[in-house]
Amino acid sequence: MNLQYYFNFVTIVEEGSLTAAAKKLRIAQPALSNQVKAMEQKYGTRLFFRGSRRLELTDAGSILYQKAKRICEIELAAKNEIASGFSGQRGTLRLGVTSSLATDRLYNVLSTFLKKYPETNVKILEDSPAELLRLLQKGQVEAVMVQVPYEINENFEVLYRAEDELVAMYAPDAPFFKDCPEEEIPFEKLDNVPLSIVEKSRSTIASVFREKNMKLNIKCLSTRLQMTMRWARTGLAVALASKNSMNELGFGDMAYKRISGHPLAAPRFTLVAQKRKYRTQVIDNFLYMLSAAYKLGIETKLAGPIFDDDDEELED
């Protein structure tokens, strides 16, 4: 049975006549009468008593009216809830992020987002870049923040890719670079210096050392950036990391030197999302906030935001 029949049936009952209902629904009265006959045929019984000036429901009609009214209420509630989801006012934000990027800065953005959209929920998945991209492919997350570039599926969109300046980070009381009071050191000063590096950058760093005929002395090799920094904090090695990572991961108290004369850069993060046609408004609203907080400048790539009239903080 066509759902519209139930809406029309409820209108007939509440208007009290076919004529009034047809006028309100803006359909021809004979068409509305045929709908009633079709419903009576479907349920095998009369729904209205005929003959009186005002339509009166039979017992079967009263039962159907109560159920039809409930059907209409459920359909309207679903329509409104879906519309709220499209506007980004409610729904679930599903974001994947590597542990090294799950910083206070990110969670401050999430906190602001939830305050602005209290009817949304947040689902944050922390995992490896490869696993997060797999979850993105399966649709279990709508966007991911990873630290290294990976092969991007055609259904994905790279919204942002950033690199940070690489610095030599070490404990303030460590015996490194004592002969270099300047804020910057030449890359050659890292010759045979015990280093703490992330495993994924080993081949790139090793290649530069070979080109410069320098000795690469790896004291600590870790899969996690935090571990390389913790090792540097012991004073036994120099960590090669980005300055932004130092602050975001809680190592702002460490000493560091800028490094000149090298082609290396520390990948900050790559923001990858499903293509716009597959994304919800919820994720675009969040990505807009993220762009503002991180100064990414990706607003033109997003479908939002849809904010209330009193929202001012992200206006142009």
Image (spheres, rainbow, N blue to C red):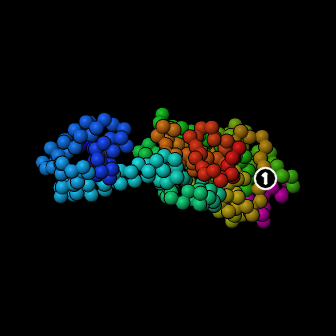
Q: Is residue 45 magenta?
A: no
Q: Is residue 177 magenta?
A: yes
- In the picture, measured across the screen, residue 278 lies left or right of residue 113, that is left
Q: Quadrant of residue 162?
A: top right
Residue 117 lies, in percent from the top left, at 55, 56
- In the picture, measured across the screen, residue 293 lies left or right of residue 22, that is right
According to the picture, the residue beneath numbered tag 1 turns out to be 257
Please state which of residues 288 and 95 is positioned toward the viewer in this rendering: 288
Looking at this view, name the residue that lies furthest to the left.
44
- In the picture, measured across the screen, residue 164 lies left or right of residue 78, that is right
Please state which of residues 107 and 103 is positioned toward the viewer in this rendering: 107
Type of amino acid at the residue the image marks with label 1: Lys
- The magenta-colored residue range is 170-180
Residue 246 lies, in percent from the top left, at 70, 57
- Is the magenta region chiefly helix, strand or loop? loop
Please state which of residues 113 and 307 is positioned toward the viewer in this rendering: 307
Tell me the crowding category of disc 1: few under 14, some 14 to 19, or many 20 or more residues within 10 angstroms, Cα based.
some
Residue 144 lies, in percent from the top left, at 53, 48
Determine the residue positioned at 26% across, 51% down: 54
Residue at disc 1, secondary structure = strand
User: How many numbered callouts?
Assistant: 1
Let me know if residue 286 appears in the view. yes
- In the picture, measured across the screen, residue 78 lies left or right of residue 59, that is right
Determine the residue positioned at 73% across, 50% down: 167
* Quadrant showing the N terminus: top left
Determine the residue positioned at 77% across, 59% down: 255
